[in-house]
Amino acid sequence: MKRKITFLTIVMAFMFFLSTNAQEESSWSTGVDLYSNYIWRGLKFGSGPALQPTIEFNAGGLTIGAWGSYCFSENEAMETDLYAGYEFDLGKNNTLGFTVTDYYFPGTDYFTGDSHFFEPMMSLGLGNLTLTGAYMFGLETKDIYLEAAFAAGPVNLTLGAGDGQYTSNQKFNVCNIGLSTSKSLKVTDSFSIPVTGSLILNPSNEALYIVVGISL
């Protein structure tokens, strides 16, 4: 496990070094989201609202960042992820992206614990349609997740399927049917807060969620 973490750290550091020596314009950004519940790929983590901070570095098509989620309840469902990815511009509003994520769940030692899960992911953007494929592994976990997302004006539609943790019987099945939309909540003439609302159905777990979040 420690060798996997070290390898990912070296890869991210190498990509960061290349980006700082490239001619593309680079930038740092940070923010935080507050959601009524933490729902991910049709799965519910923890209970109660979740605070989700992020910090990110961008240079051209390269992205390196850290993201976390912390629930306001006794079941905190803490999560701290590191990720690195690159997106290629294929022209005509089409893109091809590759991302590697280290999912870490606090509670054991970061370097020697078994709370890490790794996921290579590929995404293909075809105009308003985005196709995603991901494979998560760690300990005895070997889970596949496939998703198609379509932006239809003010509404985003999502259809996802997976196996392992994503379904009630661990067999490959539809686990994430989502409909979401967003708006800007005007606070002052010069300041507004983005608000997102989602309706999410997991047919495998027979669960339906309504989630609202704000971004700062």
Image (cartoon, rainbow, N blue to C red):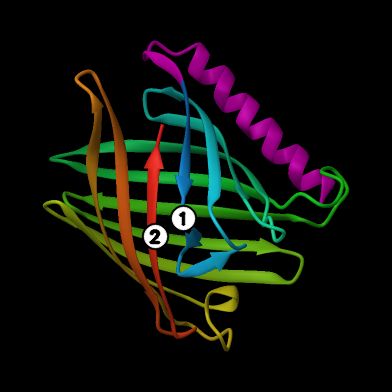
What's drawn in magenta, residue-wise? Answer: 1-28
**Residue 197 % position (x, y):** 31, 55
Q: Label 1 vs label 2: CA separation? A: 6 Å
Q: Magenta: predominant secondary structure element?
A: helix
Category of crowding for the residue at label 2, using alpha-carbon neighbours closer than 10 angstroms: few (below 14), some (14–19), many (at least 20):
some
Depth order, front residue of 165/75: 75
Secondary structure of residue under mark 2: strand
| Picture residue at 46% right of the left edge, 40% below the top | 33
Q: Identify the disc placed on residue 36.
A: 1
Res 99 label? none
Asked whether 126 or 51 is in front, the reply is 51
Is 22 contained in the magenta span?
A: yes
Per the image, the residue denoted by label 2 is: 211
Q: Nearer the viewer, residue 77 or 135?
A: 77
Mark 1 secondary-structure assignment: loop
Q: Residue at x 16, y 49 (%)?
A: 127
